[in-house]
Amino acid sequence: MNFESLTAEISALKTIVSTQQNTIDQLQHLNQSLETLNESLQIQLARFNRHYFGAKTEAMNPDQLSLFAETKTEDLAAIEQLQDQAEQQNTDDQHSDHPKKKRKPAVARHPLPDHLERISVVHLPKVDGVEDISTSPDWVHLRDDIKETLEMIPARFFVKRHIYPNYVNPTTGEMVCALRPAAIIDGGYASAALLSWVIINKYVDHLPLYRIEQMAAREGVTLSRSTLADWIGRVGTALTPLFNVLQTQLLNTTVLHADETPVDQLAPKTPHKNHKSYLWVYRTNGLESDVSSFVLFDYQASRAADHPKAFLKGFKGHLMVDDYSGYKALFKQQDHPIIELGCWAHARRKFFDLYDASQNTMAKAVIDQIARLYQIESTIKAMPIDERERIRKTQAIPILDELYTYLMHHSHTLAPSSSSAKAVNYTLKRWQALIRYANSGDLPIDNNPVENAIRPIALGRKNWLFIGSESAGKRAAVIMSLLATAKVNGLNPAIWLTDTLQRLPTTKDKDINTLLPLKTWTVQDEY
């Protein structure tokens, strides 16, 4: 073989090797793309399965009743009831001296609340020849056996007649009559208690108006949907001043949570296609249990960044949010910059989805580290702020430092477009906002409090389906804000609302703080 032939053969081999290397590179790239796609599809499938068939919790080992636990409990109770009836029948049919079976131990139940009214009913034994054993000289009262049963009176409609007698002085001709108290709806027949019942049914128990109409109809009372809607509109308008005061007080706090959720709004011009509006939710920090909390809803026609900017105008402090871009402008303001707090629940969710789909060991390691952070939070929840800060700095910060090193290491080894890389990069991108809480004792670790406030809205959406108009949405936001604030402050929303609707028409502006649903609120004894 001559030199030229050898050179040509070597050149041909190099071409083949180069072609094969290109093929290998392409296959590796394709393999990496397929692995990334597979990982992404696994996560989507896991989310789908969890949404439709599984528990909504993100706990690694959820310890809860199965889907059919309630039915199982009902069936077991019914079987036990039939057995008891059969045993009782056998005992009655047999001779009286037949030995009775041992009574089953009573099931442990919660004690009946002490604050409930007690109505005593005395059941006197009947004795032949004795009309009233309690007054008979032949019988002495020994003791009382007491059994308490929990009773309730369903919603009962009745008419309260307010009579205002007129008197005249025959000598002077002067006439006098008691003044009629002002009411939320002048000249209307709905009492404060009835208005409260309607509002609570719609915005706490999430019943649409047609169901409230049906409930009243069962009692022979006609409450048309148009009448109910009119009442709700008037109540929302009347309660707006309280909402405005709450907003002012909320903006004077130093730590807030924020989130938003979509709500369909009826679009008259396109009846078959509703307009997507949003309820923006703002909640104060709940770490100090002795301080009143605020939950405010702001109804807006879009998800534009201008809405939180306008609502939070003048607020100075920390704001806990997710990574939605609409909040970013708040952290770049020149006049009143707001300090961003990152949510560890959101960061954890990225890794939970990854682990749930593919049992990813990296994701499991991160989840375990985050669990350690939450374990610390559970032990210091009731501690004073300074003690909470000390423990966070000594225990949480070392865990965060270790987690940061771990994530940085994996950020250089993972395929850039993989779900694993996205989870890691999401956390690293927001790292400063995520760890900010650990250097304090008064900042929250996550945005769960405001997400809990949003959760009932999802249930409401399934029932009332959409908001009728933008003005109706704003009135609904006012009502929901006041009721949600009452709930987080440990108040009974129905009692607070009934009392407030009764007192509001005669309350002066300077005394409106006495009506706010805060921990300082007290019910007026008599109206």
Image: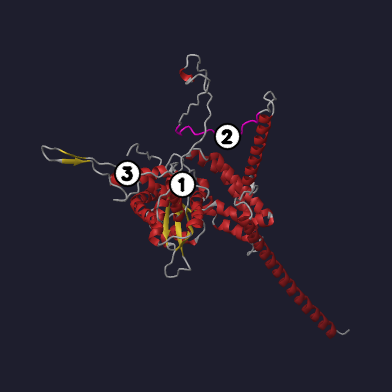
Q: Nearer the viewer, residue 505 or 286?
A: 505
> Which label lies toward us, 2 or 3?
2
In the foreground, 25 or 312: 312
Above or below for 130 versus 57: above
Q: Determine the residue positioned at 57% across, 58% down.
A: 426
Query: Is there CB contact under 8 Å for labels 1 and 2?
Result: no
Q: Is residue 80 left or right of residue 483?
A: right
> From this viewpoint, which residue is outermost toward the right?
1
Q: Quadrant of residue 372?
A: top right
What residue sits right under mark 2 in the picture? 109
Q: Residue furthest front?
A: 129
Instruction: Pick the residue in front: 274 or 434.
Output: 274
Residue type of the residue flagged with mark 1: Asn
Specify few, some or many for label 3: CA neighbours under 10 Å numbering under 14, 14-19, or 20 or more. many
Marks 3 and 1 in Cβ contact (< 8 Å): no
What is the x, y in percent for residue 433?
Answer: 51, 53
- Residue type for callout 2: Arg
Which comes before the other along the chain, label 1 or label 2? 2
Q: Which residue is mark 3?
A: 503
Residue 309 percent location from the top left of the image: 41, 59
What residue does disc 1 label? 285
Tell me the element at label 1: loop
Establish if 501 lies above or below 50. Answer: above
Considering only order in the chain, which callout, 1 or 3, is on the residue closer to the N terminus?
1
Q: Are marks 2 and 3 in contact (CB under 8 Å)?
A: no
